[in-house]
Image: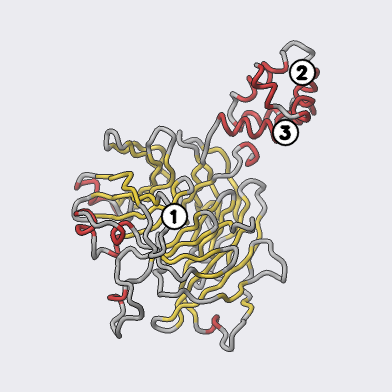
Amino acid sequence: MASTTSISTAPADRSIRAATTCNDGELHSDMLREVLLRLPARQLCRLRAVCRAWRSLISDPAFVAAHASRHPGPLVAVGVIAGKFGGMVELVLLDMSGNIRKRVPAGGLRHEAKMLTHGHLAAMALDGQCLRVRVVDMESGAVSLVPDRIQVEHASDPRSQATGGVPVLGRAASGEHKLLRISRKGRDDQVCHVATIGGGGGGGWTERPAPPVPVFLGHGRAVVVDGIAYFLVQPARNFWGGARHDFDEPDGIASFDLATEQWSPTILRGPVSSCTDDTAEHTAGYESRFQLTALNGRLVVIHRNVDHCSMDLWFRTGCSSDEGRAPWHRRYVIRYDSEEARRLAGAVDPLWELDDGRLAVWCLFSGGYGRLHKVLRTYDPSTNAFADVKEIEEECVGVGVYTGDILSSY
């Protein structure tokens, strides 16, 4: 018990003593703390109502941090269409046992939404141009709206020309959460806009420099890691009217610093163009099968080999050189049989690497009569086996990971 006392702050000690007093001295303070730390977050939140002293203890930052270390996350956040007649979005937070830990109302839905998450925030694009974005704090339940105003810094109004686009959400090194939106203008040109969540100046979007090379737009083509937004580059071969640039590898990655709001002039080379072994030669030329994701705060390139019913996960393991080369490690090779591959309507999307080496993954399966099965699963690389955690019956608008404080989310 000495270690417990040594790491406790003075406010925490006072909270424990007060809670013990409320307990009429029948339970030692260290024992009470240990018992409470073993309880799941939902039960703890109910115990806040026992007395003021218990509420103070359970809400103490030192206790919250100790509880988080005992009950590591994350939770999977699934956006579902709720309500008797639909039209309302609800964020369902699931643990890896399939238990619903919390439901967070996320407002009405009039059009198809695109959902993304980062930390304790979820964002949903509410229109086709992804200009109107609703942001939900999954800890507090607060909902805010990023307006569709564009602060134009150039002669033309990009809103009248730009189409499509999918935003990405992340936290800059400066601590601000920002949305970055790339959209198409004309046939090949792209424009870039940034919005600071909770920022001053009336909110809305500000135009920033366009990507140095054209980047892919859409699901799985962009991710934010450590304040940097990464986008898969469109190879030069994609442009019928002649090459727009001289980078022709299928896994090039452009990067945007959310703090400085500037693009890096260097194109990061992915695992295929960085490696020279047979694996790289085998995977070259399949740019449509590459995606980006973040697993446990690390940049990961996904290569889907449709012919071989497998998926390689390449983890970035270091910083780039002057030529944009970065060390990559193929940490997972996920294989599924041909029957399962036939049923996969979408793709197996990795969400998180669990402490025991398994992966939390999101799968879409095609069922009878056009039904789509949406299943949270785990993948065990030691046995190359999937296990179902929970199937979601409601219509989904997206799935992500909640890495905020679990105890504070109640």
How far, Cα to Cα, is label 2 from label 3?
15 Å
Residue 57 vertical placement versus 131 (above, below): above
Whether residue 94 is visible to the viewer of this picture, yes or no, is: yes
Q: Residues within 10 Å of mark 3 (few under 14, many from 20)?
A: some
Q: Residues at badges 2 and 3 in contact (C-beta under 8 Å)?
A: no
Q: Amino acid at mark 2?
A: Thr
Q: Which residue is mark 3?
A: 60
Tell me the mark number nearer the camera, choosing from 3 and 1.
Answer: 1
Q: Amino acid at mark 1?
A: Cys
Q: Position of residue 283 (x, y in %)?
A: 23, 58
Marker disc for residue 136 = none
- Badge 1 element: loop
Is 116 or 196 nearer to us in this picture?
A: 196
Q: Quadrant of residue 281?
A: bottom left
Q: Amino acid at mark 3?
A: Asp
Tell me the mark number nearer the camera, choosing from 2 and 1.
Answer: 1
How far, Cα to Cα, is label 3 from label 1?
38 Å
- Badge 2 element: helix
Q: Which residue is mark 1?
A: 319
Q: Residue at x 50, y 57 (%)?
A: 224
